[in-house]
Amino acid sequence: MYEKIASNQRKSALIVLGALIFTGGLGYLFGLLIGGGSFRTAVVGLVVALLFSAGLSYWSYAHGDQLVLRTSRATLVTHEQEPRLHNVVEGLAIAAGLPKPAVYVVPEKAPNAFATGRDAEHSSIAVTQGLLDTMNRVELEGVIGHEMSHVRDRDILLGTIVATLVGAVVLIAEFMLRWFFWGGMFGGRGGDREGGGEGFAILAAVGLIVALVTPFFAQIIKLAMSRRREYLADVEGVKLTRYPPGLASALRKIAGDPTPMRVANNATAHLWLNQPSRIHGEENHWFENLFSTHPPIQDRIRILEEM
């Protein structure tokens, strides 16, 4: 168990580092193109790209949780309204050594859950009504333990950083494409730049290719991080409950439920316990898994059963 946790943490750190290098590298290349090969302009592009990412990350850090809750139509519930849910959340918060998160219920029939918040002191756990209706206590504890691990590991912050870096990369790539087609390569000014000619044409061609393929690779970085953190939350969640079959049984029920979710979208899909768009009861093709926000649920169940 501890070996798997350490492995996941190392791989997550590498993904974040890769996302940062990717963002800075794209800004550097864009600056190089705008400046006609000027090193100074390239460095400015790198700094601007990283500052832009930092600004977006801060806004998401400060306001992202409330936006997610509103988007999901989650409603804050009291202990009197949902005593079983509150008791489970409170017990696992004590086990994790964390403040009790705010508790929300999403009016959805599909069983699912997510955690959000910028830190443990400002965290929330939301479950769907379908989850409350279908799970017994040990299964509910397994689900809440998983979400509590996301809170303890600050996965929301980590996910925000990666998602924001990916968003910044896509925006920079969009700027590059617009520059190519309106003011750069096809604007009639490329040949007048310092260091123009064949060298600049090669640089521009490389930049165009990078701008076209960047959104694809940026999305892969985001999805790889999301999948890695789901494995880690499963393993750490059962450390809190001391009962792997609870979460395994909950995932099995979720996998077999055919009810579609109405409130989930591409922007919030990675937050949920299980990918809302996944085809239940079927094994997805490897190409579908490549673009999935979550690892295959059968793999998650198998790992829990091995524990």
Image: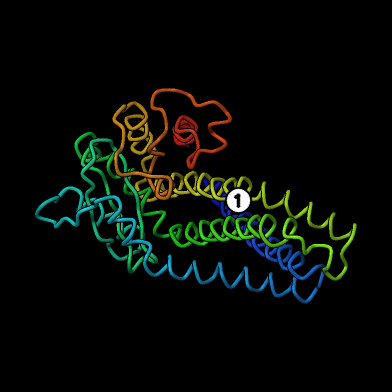
Q: In this image, 46 relative to 131: left or right?
A: right
Looking at the image, the residue that sits furthest to the left is 80
Q: Disc count in the image?
A: 1
Q: Determine whether 88 is above or below 94 in the image.
A: above
Residue shown at 33%/69% (left/top)? 121
Nearest to the observer: residue 46 or residue 138: 46
Q: In this image, 66 relative to 83: left or right?
A: right
Nearest to the observer: residue 293 or residue 39: 39
Q: Determine whether 99 is above or below 302 in the image.
A: below
The x, y position of residue 134, in whole percent, is: 22, 34
The x, y position of residue 281, in whole percent, is: 39, 23
Res 216 quadrant in image: top right
Residue labelled with disc 1: 218
How are the colours assigned in the image? rainbow
Looking at the image, the residue that sits furthest to the front is 188
The x, y position of residue 218, in whole percent, is: 60, 50
Which element carries disc 1, helix, strand or loop? helix
Q: In this image, 236 relative to 40: left or right?
A: left
Res 257 quadrant in image: top left
The x, y position of residue 211, in whole percent, is: 68, 52
Q: In this image, 70 relative to 149: left or right?
A: left
Dot 1 alpha-carbon crowd within 10 angstroms: few under 14, some 14 to 19, many 20 or more: many
Residue shown at 65%/55% (left/top)? 177
Q: Determine whether 301 is above or below 208 in the image.
A: above
Q: Amino acid at mark 1?
A: Ala
Looking at the image, the residue that sits furthest to the top is 282
